Amino acid sequence: MMDRRSFFARLVAAAGGAALAWLALPGKAWAKKMAFGLDKAEALKKVGGQALIKLKDKEILFVRDGEASVRALDPLCPHEKCKVTYDDASKKVVCPCHKSSFELATGKVLSGPSPRGLTTYPAELSGEKVIVSLE
Protein backbone atom coordinates (compact mmCIF):
# COMPACT_ATOMS: atom_id res chain seq x y z
CA MET A 1 0.00 0.00 0.00
CA MET A 2 1.27 3.45 -0.94
CA ASP A 3 1.33 6.24 1.62
CA ARG A 4 -0.25 9.58 0.88
CA ARG A 5 3.04 11.42 0.25
CA SER A 6 4.21 8.83 -2.32
CA PHE A 7 0.83 8.89 -4.02
CA PHE A 8 0.90 12.68 -4.47
CA ALA A 9 4.56 12.65 -5.57
CA ARG A 10 3.71 10.13 -8.30
CA LEU A 11 0.59 12.05 -9.26
CA VAL A 12 2.58 15.30 -9.67
CA ALA A 13 5.30 13.50 -11.65
CA ALA A 14 2.72 11.92 -13.96
CA ALA A 15 0.94 15.24 -14.49
CA GLY A 16 4.25 16.98 -15.24
CA GLY A 17 5.19 14.25 -17.71
CA ALA A 18 1.82 14.50 -19.43
CA ALA A 19 2.16 18.28 -19.68
CA LEU A 20 5.64 17.97 -21.22
CA ALA A 21 4.40 15.36 -23.70
CA TRP A 22 1.53 17.63 -24.70
CA LEU A 23 3.88 20.57 -25.20
CA ALA A 24 6.15 18.48 -27.43
CA LEU A 25 3.39 17.27 -29.74
CA PRO A 26 4.33 17.58 -33.43
CA GLY A 27 2.50 20.44 -35.07
CA LYS A 28 1.78 22.09 -31.73
CA ALA A 29 1.08 25.68 -32.65
CA TRP A 30 3.27 28.08 -30.72
CA ALA A 31 2.56 30.88 -33.12
CA LYS A 32 1.94 34.29 -31.67
CA LYS A 33 -0.41 36.04 -34.03
CA MET A 34 -0.02 39.76 -34.25
CA ALA A 35 -1.73 42.35 -36.40
CA PHE A 36 -1.09 45.91 -37.46
CA GLY A 37 -2.94 48.30 -39.72
CA LEU A 38 -1.67 49.35 -43.12
CA ASP A 39 -1.83 52.93 -41.82
CA LYS A 40 1.28 52.00 -39.77
CA ALA A 41 3.13 50.88 -42.90
CA GLU A 42 2.13 53.10 -45.81
CA ALA A 43 4.56 51.34 -48.21
CA LEU A 44 2.55 48.13 -47.88
CA LYS A 45 -0.54 49.76 -49.36
CA LYS A 46 0.83 49.15 -52.85
CA VAL A 47 2.08 45.97 -54.52
CA GLY A 48 5.89 45.90 -54.48
CA GLY A 49 6.08 47.95 -51.30
CA GLN A 50 8.16 46.86 -48.34
CA ALA A 51 8.43 47.84 -44.70
CA LEU A 52 10.75 46.86 -41.88
CA ILE A 53 8.63 46.59 -38.73
CA LYS A 54 9.58 45.66 -35.19
CA LEU A 55 7.12 43.32 -33.45
CA LYS A 56 7.79 41.91 -30.00
CA ASP A 57 11.53 42.69 -30.10
CA LYS A 58 11.87 41.08 -33.54
CA GLU A 59 12.39 42.99 -36.79
CA ILE A 60 10.42 41.61 -39.72
CA LEU A 61 10.63 42.56 -43.40
CA PHE A 62 7.14 42.73 -44.90
CA VAL A 63 6.69 42.77 -48.67
CA ARG A 64 3.39 43.35 -50.46
CA ASP A 65 3.65 40.85 -53.31
CA GLY A 66 0.08 40.93 -54.60
CA GLU A 67 -3.24 42.73 -54.34
CA ALA A 68 -4.33 40.32 -51.61
CA SER A 69 -1.05 38.99 -50.24
CA VAL A 70 1.93 39.96 -48.14
CA ARG A 71 5.13 38.10 -47.20
CA ALA A 72 7.10 38.28 -43.95
CA LEU A 73 10.79 37.39 -43.59
CA ASP A 74 13.69 37.73 -41.20
CA PRO A 75 15.60 40.72 -42.62
CA LEU A 76 19.08 39.56 -41.59
CA CYS A 77 21.17 37.75 -44.18
CA PRO A 78 22.58 34.55 -42.65
CA HIS A 79 25.99 35.26 -44.24
CA GLU A 80 27.10 38.43 -42.44
CA LYS A 81 23.87 39.70 -40.81
CA CYS A 82 23.38 42.58 -43.26
CA LYS A 83 19.79 43.76 -43.69
CA VAL A 84 18.18 42.53 -46.86
CA THR A 85 15.71 44.43 -49.04
CA TYR A 86 13.17 43.50 -51.65
CA ASP A 87 13.98 44.25 -55.29
CA ASP A 88 10.64 44.62 -57.04
CA ALA A 89 12.24 44.56 -60.52
CA SER A 90 13.73 41.07 -60.03
CA LYS A 91 11.06 39.92 -57.53
CA LYS A 92 13.85 38.76 -55.20
CA VAL A 93 15.07 39.62 -51.74
CA VAL A 94 18.68 40.77 -51.97
CA CYS A 95 21.54 41.42 -49.58
CA PRO A 96 23.39 44.64 -50.38
CA CYS A 97 26.64 43.50 -48.71
CA HIS A 98 27.67 40.41 -50.67
CA LYS A 99 24.88 40.04 -53.24
CA SER A 100 23.13 36.96 -51.90
CA SER A 101 19.61 36.71 -53.28
CA PHE A 102 16.61 34.88 -51.89
CA GLU A 103 13.23 33.71 -53.12
CA LEU A 104 10.51 35.92 -51.66
CA ALA A 105 7.93 33.20 -50.98
CA THR A 106 10.19 30.66 -49.28
CA GLY A 107 13.35 32.55 -48.30
CA LYS A 108 15.40 29.95 -50.23
CA VAL A 109 18.93 31.02 -51.28
CA LEU A 110 19.05 31.68 -55.02
CA SER A 111 22.64 32.95 -55.29
CA GLY A 112 25.55 34.31 -53.31
CA PRO A 113 27.54 33.26 -50.29
CA SER A 114 24.67 32.87 -47.82
CA PRO A 115 24.89 29.43 -46.19
CA ARG A 116 21.12 29.11 -45.79
CA GLY A 117 17.84 30.80 -46.58
CA LEU A 118 15.91 33.44 -44.72
CA THR A 119 13.36 32.53 -42.07
CA THR A 120 9.83 33.20 -43.30
CA TYR A 121 6.71 33.78 -41.22
CA PRO A 122 3.09 33.09 -42.18
CA ALA A 123 1.45 36.41 -43.03
CA GLU A 124 -1.81 37.49 -44.60
CA LEU A 125 -3.82 40.56 -45.47
CA SER A 126 -7.21 40.89 -43.88
CA GLY A 127 -8.90 44.05 -45.05
CA GLU A 128 -6.62 46.89 -44.01
CA LYS A 129 -4.62 44.77 -41.56
CA VAL A 130 -1.57 42.57 -41.84
CA ILE A 131 -1.66 39.46 -39.64
CA VAL A 132 1.57 37.59 -38.98
CA SER A 133 2.37 34.50 -36.92
CA LEU A 134 5.69 34.72 -35.11
CA GLU A 135 6.98 31.36 -33.91
Image (tube, rainbow, N blue to C red):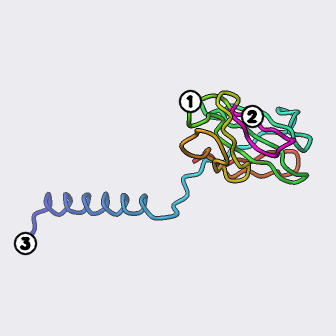
**Dot 1, how many residues are within 10 Å of its Cα: few (below 14), some (14-19), or many (20+)?**
few
Q: Mark 2: which amino acid?
A: Thr
Badge number at residue 80: 1
Which residue lies at the image location 73% right of the left edge and 53% below the top edge? 105
Q: Tag 2 or tag 3, which sits nearer the N-term?
A: 3
- Find disc 2 in the rendering and name its residue: 85
Which residue lies at the image location 21% right of the left edge and 59% below the top edge? 8
Q: Tag 1 or tag 3, which sits nearer the N-term?
A: 3
Camera-side mark, 3 or 1: 1
Q: Position of residue 65 (x, y in %)?
A: 84, 48
Which residue lies at the image location 68% right of the left edge and 34% below the top edge? 99
- Find disc 3 in the rendering and name its residue: 1
In magenta, the rendered stretch is 84-95
Query: Viewed as shown, does residue 54 lie left or right of 63?
Result: left
Instruction: Indicate yes or no whether the magenta region holds residue 94.
Output: yes
Which residue lies at the image location 64% right of the left edge and 31% below the top edge? 98
Query: Viewed as shown, does residue 13 lie left or right of 134?
Result: left
Q: Is residue 126 above or below residue 113?
A: below
Camera-side mark, 3 or 2: 2
Q: Mark 3: which amino acid?
A: Met
Q: Tag 1 or tag 2, which sits nearer the N-term?
A: 1
Q: Position of residue 54 (x, y in %)?
A: 68, 31
Which of 94 and 74 lies nearest the eye of the viewer? 94
